[in-house]
Structure formats: structure tokens, C-alpha cells
Amino acid sequence: MIGLHPRSRRVQVIPPVFIWLGVLMAVLLVASCGGGLPPKSLRKARVEVSEWTPSKELVFQKEGFGLVKAVLPLNDDAGILVVGGGQVCRASLSQSEHQCVELTAGLSDLDVVPNALGEPSAIVGSGLWGNPSAASVNMDGSLNWRYDGGYDAMGRARYVDDGDKRLVVLGNEWNPLLFLDFATGDTVRQSDPAKIIASADFTGDGRLEILLGVGETDFVLFDGGGTELAELSVSTDYWYEPVLTSAGGLFLVLSAGNVLDVHDSQLGHVRRFDALGADSPLHVEAAAFGRAGPDAPFAALFKGRGGWHRSVLYLFAASGDLVYKEIFDGDFQSIYPLEEAEGTTFLVGGRGEVWKYSFPN
């Protein structure tokens, strides 16, 4: 019989230094993936600033819904549209009821596409790890089309108007941008790699333009034909993914620690707020003006590492003063104002829930 004799076996002892190196590498891996404990200042949910004191009402809650990606008012009734990666729900603000449909394609990153009247018409986005790479879904959950390009086409999917033709733009910083027909999903053309930031009607001409990142913190606004319309370069102290306001006018919001800057639709700087205690890697994730900005109450949601599961809500008065700050024990990444006869009201979306914050001021 061929084999090892028991007395010939050796026990290999791993030196302690390699054990500690392994532990260090594991810690670094967890941190790089968004894990680790939140800083002490964020571990306890609490209200830190309350110059304006809101009333709070839970207006939507659904088990298994996942993270609320967008909250939009419905024009035809006193209700809201709650959009998640796997479901879309119509909810009433006056009654604890909702009607939901499943999305035929699960999307981890998405945007709601408006029609000519500004109403939600479709959902465009991409799935986790590029499954799907891109998809267009109707508001009733049915699938228009999906594009599966594997790992080579992982990234963000947004949209742009090229003349009379609407296109879905898919890509990341490493691979060429793909332009797909909005109606069919067929490939139309490619262009140089760039980071997709956001799509909107920046120029007010009724057509959708797209904002791209061409450097770590260098941003360029393009029309659908590839013409450069505006550009913005900021220091690398700023977070590399700015956000668009969800309402109160179209503004671009960037953060660098506690510095919160607002730029207009042509990327000109218009306001600066001091987000008390927002040390890096906390960064702005969603923002909105309560009324037509920029001289109006302004709300912003900050998030840190994904594994922290902590979010911070800031509200600033029209004067720019911080009047409310709340630390959430959970993920809240969408915000939208409601028009009320008096005061300032925001809908704040978290994981499977939407809260209504009504400030009397």
C-alpha cells in the first residue's frame, strides 16, 4: 500500500505574523466592500437638531419590498407611487392600503422615465452584477425588453433624446458606452467610456440630456447627439457621484464631508449648506427643495458605507440655517416634497417604508 506512514506526517505551524496578515486582509476586504461598524457618532438613532419639529406619519409599509428607490406623487389622486427594485406600489396617503405589481426584471439601480407631461411612463435600470445589464419596464411591471451583456456591460443605465429618437445609455468607466433603442433595446451605437451620472431635461427644451463623469470629479453635460453643453470640475474632496434634486427645480447636488453644494441645471454654483457632522465617507444620496429652489427649504439624505446601514436626514431653512437633523438606524435613500397649504412636507423612503415628515414652518 502506498501512503504516508503516521510517523512521517508533519504538522505545519503557521507563523503568527501570517495569521495577523490574514486577519488584516480580511478586515480590509470587508471595509472595501462597505462593511465594518459605523462610527460611534452614528451608532445610535436620534434627532440631533430640532429647530423645526415635525410630525411623523408612516404612510407606506410592506414586508419584503426592499429599499425604496423613488417616491413620486400621483397626479390623479391623493396617493403616491413607491418604486423599488422588484416592485411598484400605488399607496394612499389617507388610508393604510396599497396595490403592488412585481417587476418582471429585478433592478438594483433604476430611474423613472417621465413622459412629455412629466408623469412616470417607464422604469429603466440595471440588475445586480449585470443581470440584466439593462432593462426597460412598464409602470404595470411588464417587461418592454432586457439586454444581457454579462460582466462586460455591467454599469448604470439611463436615457437621452437624440433628435426624435429616445435612447437608453448603458456603461461604466471602463467599457464603451452602449446606446440602445429605447423602444426595442437594439444596439444603436457606442462611444467612449464614461461614468453615467443622471438624465433629465437640463435645458428646458423638452428633450432629455445626460450628465457624464469624464474624470473622478469632472462632469460634462451632453445632448443626445454628443454635443457638449456644460462642464463642471471640482476637487477630489467631493464625492464622485453627485445627485439630482427630485423636485423643487432641477439642481445638481455635490458633497465633500460637511460641505453641501448646489448647482443649477447649467452646472453653475448657486448655494452652499453646512451639513453638520457629515464626515467622509458620508455623502449625499438624495435631495430636494420643498418649493421652487434654490431659495426654499432644502432637504438632503446622506449615507455612508453600505454595511453601516445608517442614513442622516438634514433639513435647511430657506435662509440656509440647519433646522433639523436625524440619524436613522437603517437605509433611507429617497425623498420627495409634498405640496401642502401650510408648512413644509417631505416623503422619506427607507427599506420597505415611507414616512411623511410635516414641518409647520
Image (cartoon, rainbow, N blue to C red):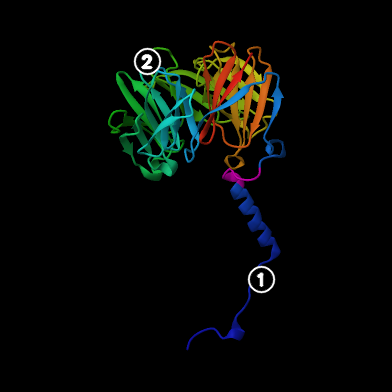
Where in the figure is residue 106, as x and y percent of width and height?
Answer: 40, 39
Q: Tell me which corner region of the image, top left, top right, bottom left or bottom right, holds residue 123.
A: top left
Q: Amino acid at mark 1?
A: Val
Magenta-colored segment: predominant secondary structure: loop
Label 2 crowd (10 A; few <14 / some 14-19 / many >=20): few
Please indicate, yes or no, whether residue 212 appears anywhere in the rendered image: no
Total number of numbered discs in the rendering:
2
Q: Is residue 140 magenta?
A: no
Where in the figure is residue 233, as x and y percent of width and height?
Answer: 55, 23
Query: Is 39 situated above or below 267?
Result: below
Where in the figure is residue 33, as x and y percent of width and height?
Answer: 56, 45
Looking at the image, which residue is at 67% across and 20% down?
53
Q: Nearer the viewer, mark 1 or mark 2?
A: 2
- Asked whether 99 or 220 is in front, the reply is 99
The residue pinned by badge 2 equals: 117
Label 1 crowd (10 A; few <14 / some 14-19 / many >=20): few
Position of residue 177 in the picture relative to residue 230 (left or right) = left
Position of residue 75 in the picture relative to residue 317 (left or right) = left
Query: Where does the magenta region start and end?
Result: 31-37
Marks 1 and 2 sit apart, C-alpha to C-alpha, by 71 Å
Q: Residue furthest bottom?
A: 1
Query: Is 38 situated above or below 17?
Result: above
Where in the figure is residue 38, as x and y percent of width and height?
Answer: 66, 41
Please indicate, yes or no, whether residue 201 appears anywhere in the rendered image: yes
Q: Quadrant of the C terminus?
A: top right
The residue pinned by badge 1 equals: 13
Q: Tell me which corner region of the image, top left, top right, bottom left or bottom right, holds residue 120.
A: top left
Looking at the image, which residue is at 54% across and 83% down?
4
Labels 1 and 2: the sequence-earlier one: 1
Query: Is 281 situated above or below 247?
Result: below
